[in-house]
Image (cartoon, rainbow, N blue to C red):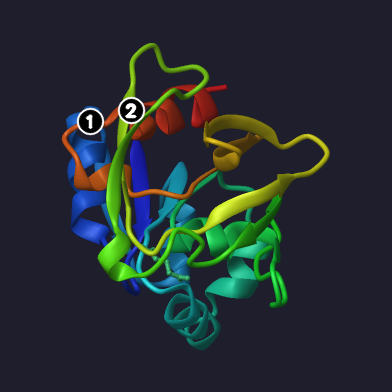
Amino acid sequence: MKIGVLALQGAVREHIRHIELCGHEGIPVKKVEQLEEIEGLILPGGESTTLRRLMNLYGFKEAMQQSDLPMFGTCAGLIVLASDIVDEEGYLKKLDVTVARNSFGRQVDSFEADLDVKGIDHKVNGVFIRAPHIVEAHNDAEVLSRIDDRIVAVREGKYLGVSFHPELTDDFSMTKYFIEEVIGS
Ligand code: GLN
């Protein structure tokens, strides 16, 4: 399968590596036309304000709102997918959740955690870097993981969003879940 990674900003190469570890082809997506060539799209972490600005500039906002591709947002990518952002207007509004940005503290407060994720049979190692959390999952959005009372992974149909960076570890099970369970279903 060809899986795209939105390559405007952020941790692109690391996601391509995880896609390849899953036995699939990872495509850096820089132009909207490339959305036609792939079967799923990963929105990487980075800085969601910059990501939104570049998506506006290159026509990705409209193209992705109209697209019915499965999408997986990590960290800033989750913020971009969310229907609501605390104190800001939601952007793509694909995943029916309210997110709060930078809710685990500042850059110096980055941390790793071993998470229980529904549908994955071992602890998933995630890296949190100025991470958002999901304040509330609405309607059909299913909570897959929490840290204490904070939601950090959600799936709604063909959309998957996590607060953390799974691609910065050697555990590619979140990418595998996206490819096999989300795209594959
Ligand atoms: N804090 C960033 C934002 O709000 C997200 C950080 C990340 O993707 N690691 O966009």
Query: Do the CB atoms of the residues marked 2 and 1 lie less than 8 Å apart?
Result: yes
Which quarter of the rendered picture does the N terminus lie within? top left
- Residue at numbered disc 2: 124
Q: Which residue is mark 1?
A: 171
Residue 153, given in percent of the width and then of the height, sits at 53, 38
90 vs 122: above or below: below
Residue at 61 percent of width and 62 percent of height: 100
Determine which quarter of the picture holds residue 43: bottom left
Eyeballing the image, is 151 above or below 177?
below
Q: Position of residue 71 (x, y in %)?
A: 52, 47
Tell me, yes or no, if residue 175 can be seen here. Answer: yes
| Quadrant of res 5 | bottom left
From this view, report whether residue 22 is shown above or below residue 16.
above
The x and y percentages for residue 66 are 68, 61
Query: Seen from this angle, which residue lies furthest right?
Result: 139
What kind of residue is marked 1? Asp
Residue at 35% over, 35% down: 175
Residue, x 19% and y 40% (percent of image)?
169
Question: In the rendered view of the protein, which quadrant contains the C terminus?
Answer: top right
Quadrant of the displayed image that contains ligand 1? bottom left
Which amino acid does the dot numbered 2 rest on? Val
Nearer to us: label 2 or label 1: 2
Task: Please give left or right for residue 99 compared with residue 147 in the image.
Answer: right
Q: Nearer the viewer, residue 44 or 87?
A: 87
Please tell me which of labels 2 and 1 falls first in the chain.
2
